[in-house]
Amino acid sequence: MFTEKRVNRLKWACRRGMLELDVLFLPFVEAAFDELDDADKLTFERLLTCDDPDLFAWFMGHQTCHDPDLAAMVDMVLRRVKVYGE
């Protein structure tokens, strides 16, 4: 389902131009994306379509994401990046 070309597009979409998001998304895709099931991969792909101010607010804990699937993905990214960063 996720071809190499599609994954490369996701990696490109992870480059947000906002350092706070780049340091979350790029390591996550590199280290954890391949381990996700197809549903989570689709959710992550959908997360990348969100606006940067919303993403920043969710990841920094300033706001709560009201979409339960996206909120779970935000938590997953934060947990995985924290583990890899230690």
Image (tube, rainbow, N blue to C red):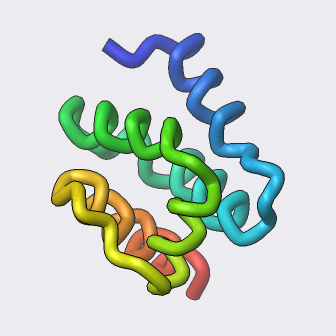
Residue 31 picture location, percent across and down: 52, 53
Residue drawn where x is 45% and y is 85% of the image:
61
Q: Where 69 falls versus 78 (above or below)?
A: above
Residue drawn where x is 44% and y is 74% of the image:
78
Q: Quadrant of the N terminus?
A: top left
Q: Where 64 falls versus 43 (above or below)?
A: below
Q: Is residue 49 left or right of residue 12?
A: left
Q: Is residue 69 left or right of residue 5?
A: left
Q: Is residue 16 left or right of residue 47?
A: right
Residue 51 picture location, percent across and down: 57, 48
Q: Camera-side residue: 20 or 82?
A: 20
Q: Where 49 falls versus 28 (above or below)?
A: above
Q: Number of marks in the image?
A: 0
Q: Would you identify the image quadrant in which residue 36 lies?
A: top left
Residue 49 picture location, percent across and down: 50, 36
Q: Quadrant of the C terminus?
A: bottom right
Q: Is residue 4 left or right of residue 68?
A: right
Residue drawn where x is 79% and y is 66% of the image:
19
Residue drawn where x is 73% and y is 48% of the image:
16
